[in-house]
Amino acid sequence: MDIPSVSVCMATYNGAAYLREQLDSILAELRPDDQVVIVDDASTDDTVALLETYRDARVEVFRNAKNLGYVSSFERALSLASGDVLLLSDQDDVWVPGRRDALADAAVKFGVVASNLLLLDTGTPLRSPLTGRPWLLHGSAEHRPLRTELMILAGNAPYFGCAMAIRRDFLPLVTPFPDYLRESHDLWIATVANRAGMLTHLEQATVLRRVHDSNASTSRPRGLVAALRSRLLLVRLWREAGRRLAATRGSR
């Protein structure tokens, strides 16, 4: 697979304010045979009208009949994608030139790749909600899976869907998403990939993240109850990842 085809998978919801800048940065990166799969989650603003102004065959828009939440919308986008490599994308960021090829090449080699990101307004990294230090991925996850898993469970692993790519043959391990998954689909993907030995890090930043009041995810510290609930979710995801991997190996 010398030149993999790419599908960009995006979920939109009331994103008209920033969507055009993001989509223009994506299309500037893509090749003629690539694809942008956009699942709109019953937006009530001008998101769909904006998308309909694009006369580009690579852009495919699907509308949820009712609001399902961003996790289900991303899952639907992944199911509709046809590319060799699937790049997750938020509706309000800006891609860094070279992102498409960098993520696609790494995903083809390893299975799942997560890159770093920078803040759009300052060009600096996010800060860890636990340590306050720059929140960056370092080294190769495949060489230290236990440390990576502990970082995920501790809530100190900066895996963001908007900075991830997935090779197509990995999809059966992560989809369908667990039926209790309402947040952290990116940590679910990272957990399965890490346990399977198919996760790698790309230290370069491939996306500029826009932080605003309507972000679906946030790096701000949670309250105690929410933090504990999140840790319990991650433990459940870790166990589910092991179950799926065992089932896959047992069927061979």
Image (cartoon, rainbow, N blue to C red):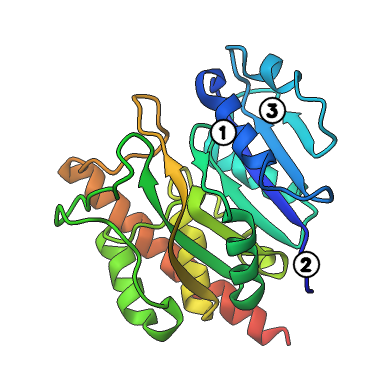
Q: Report x, y in % for residue 190.
A: 47, 64
Q: Which residue is mark 2?
A: 3
Q: Which residue is mark 1?
A: 22
Residue 180 seen from this side: no
Front of the two marks 3 and 1: 1
Q: Which quarter of the figure has residue 251?
A: bottom right
Front of the two marks 3 and 2: 2
Q: Which residue is mark 3?
A: 64
Instruction: Give the position of the N terminus as an image quadrant.
Output: bottom right
Q: Earlier in the sequence, mark 3 or mark 2?
A: 2
Asked whether disc 3 touches disc 2, contact meaning CB atoms under 8 Å apart, the reply is no
Q: In the figure, is residue 23 to the left or right of 7?
A: left
Q: Which of 131/232 is in front? A: 131
Real-space CA distance between mark 3 and mark 1, rounded to the nearest whole angstrom: 21 Å
Q: In the figure, is residue 146 to the left or right of 9?
A: left
What amino acid type is highlighted by mark number 3? Asn
Q: Earlier in the sequence, mark 3 or mark 1?
A: 1
Residue drawn where x is 55% and y is 77% of the image: 198
What amino acid type is highlighted by mark number 1? Gln
